[in-house]
């Protein structure tokens, strides 16, 4: 069963391609993106087998070549580019037809997604409308019931008239007046609210714990990837025949920092060959690896790239 390639793995591989081949791969740059040379993936695996897994590279490049602005670059260009960014290979009419189909499929997927979202919104709206009607009906019934109770409460009581020759006096039942009701509610409200306010003030005045704030500012990294730009002329030539790894000590310029590097022997021999071919003044040397312990870089690889010139730009 094939292992499922995660989005994180393919994104990491794309970033490595952009870093190793800055004249060929671009991150969402619509103007600089160019169609890639046919079979370029096999050339990458042949040059840097220690950097890429073939399945992850296949998925990552499939994602890179299926973006909308890549299809547009096929329509607007007549040639492809190699790993150095130089023109090679032509764009055929069949390539342009396939690019148009790719753009149409992307537009269709986007339109289908929007259509699926709209019915869900309308269903949600109708559901909310029904709920609103139900709440309104209940509120109306409650209002009628409350009005009926109020009418019965305010209905005048039968008065008792005294037979003695004294002024007529009407005896009414003892009922709280509206002013008394309001004052009673006000007193109850004050008694309920006052303790809550005191507690809230006490919480505001309490000082936060400095230890908790410090812990919140700590983040944990799973690994530390290191990239060093090395002077090509300073790399020593070592006979690495039959060796799997080459150990180098790198001194950081203008500092006392020294780093021990366990380098792939195959990567080292290839880098030395490129330096001899391009010359120490015509190339850049980039070393990458993981720092699991301070001062030591493990699983490192050395890449040599030609320097950009005014003519190549």
Image (cartoon, helix red, strand yellow):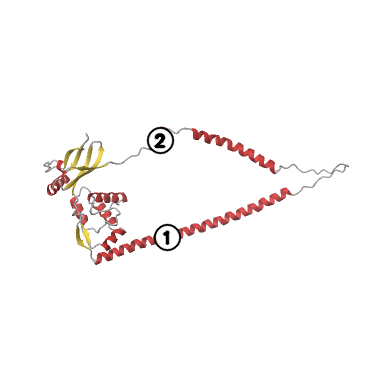
Task: Identify whether 305 is placed above or below 97.
Answer: above
Foreground label between 2 and 1:
2
Element assignment for label 2: helix
Residue named by callout 2? 213
Residue positioned 69% across, 42% down in the render: 179
Picture quarter with the C terminus: bottom left
| Residue 235 spot, x, y in % from top left | 15, 41
Residue positioned 66% across, 42% down in the render: 182
Residue positioned 55% across, 36% down in the render: 197
The residue furthest right is: 165
Please tell me the numbered disc located at residue 208: none
Judging depth in this view, the residue of 75 and 297 nearest the camera is 75
Judging depth in this view, the residue of 288 and 135 nearest the camera is 288
In the displayed structure image, the side of residue 107 where residue 132 appears, left or right:
right
Q: How many marks?
A: 2
| Residue 120 spot, x, y in % from top left | 46, 58
Q: Residues within 10 Å of mark 1 (few under 14, many from 20)?
A: few
Element assignment for label 1: helix
Task: Identify whether 285 is placed above or below 31.
Answer: above
The residue furthest front is: 310
Judging depth in this view, the residue of 177 and 174 nearest the camera is 177
Q: How far separated are the C-alphas under marks 2 and 1?
A: 45 Å
| Residue 133 spot, x, y in % from top left | 57, 57
> Do the CB atoms of the residues marked 2 and 1 lie less than 8 Å apart?
no
In the displayed structure image, the side of residue 188 where residue 1 appears, left or right:
left
Quick one: label 2 or label 1, which is nearer the N terminus?
1
Residue named by callout 1? 116
Q: Residues within 10 Å of mark 2 (few under 14, many from 20)?
A: few
Q: Quadrant of residue 66?
A: bottom left
């Amino acid at each position: 069963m094939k292992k499922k390639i995660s989005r994180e793995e393919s994104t990491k591989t794309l970033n490595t391609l952009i870093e190793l081949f800055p004249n060929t791969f671009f991150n969402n740059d619509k103007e600089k993106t160019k169609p890639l040379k046919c079979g370029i993936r096999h050339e990458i695996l042949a040059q840097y087998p220690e950097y890429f897994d073939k399945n992850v590279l296949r998925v990552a490049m499939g994602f890179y070549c299926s973006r909308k602005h890549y299809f547009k670059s096929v329509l607007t260009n007549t040639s492809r580019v190699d790993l150095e960014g130089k023109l090679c290979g032509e764009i055929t009419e069949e390539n342009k037809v396939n690019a148009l189909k790719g753009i149409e499929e992307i537009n269709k997927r986007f339109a289908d997604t929007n259509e699926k979202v709209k019915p869900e919104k309308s269903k949600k709206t109708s559901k909310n409308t029904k709920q609103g009607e139900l709440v309104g009906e209940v509120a109306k019934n409650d209002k009628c019931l409350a009005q009926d109770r109020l009418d019965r409460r305010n209905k005048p009581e039968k008065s008792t008239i005294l037979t003695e020759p004294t002024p007529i006096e009407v005896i009414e039942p003892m009922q709280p007046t509206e002013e008394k009701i309001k004052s009673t509610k006000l007193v109850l409200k004050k008694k309920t609210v006052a303790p809550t306010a005191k507690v809230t003030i006490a919480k505001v005045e309490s000082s936060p714990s400095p230890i908790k704030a410090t812990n919140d500012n700590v983040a944990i990294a799973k690994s530390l990837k290191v990239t060093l730009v090395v002077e090509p002329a300073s790399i020593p030539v070592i006979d690495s025949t039959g060796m799997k790894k080459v150990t180098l000590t790198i001194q950081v310029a203008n500092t006392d920092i020294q780093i021990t590097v366990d380098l792939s022997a195959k990567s080292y021999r290839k880098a030395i060959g490129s330096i001899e071919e391009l010359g120490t003044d015509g190339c850049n040397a980039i070393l990458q690896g993981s720092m699991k312990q301070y001062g030591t870089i493990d699983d490192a690889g050395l890449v040599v790239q030609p320097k950009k010139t005014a003519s190549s730009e």
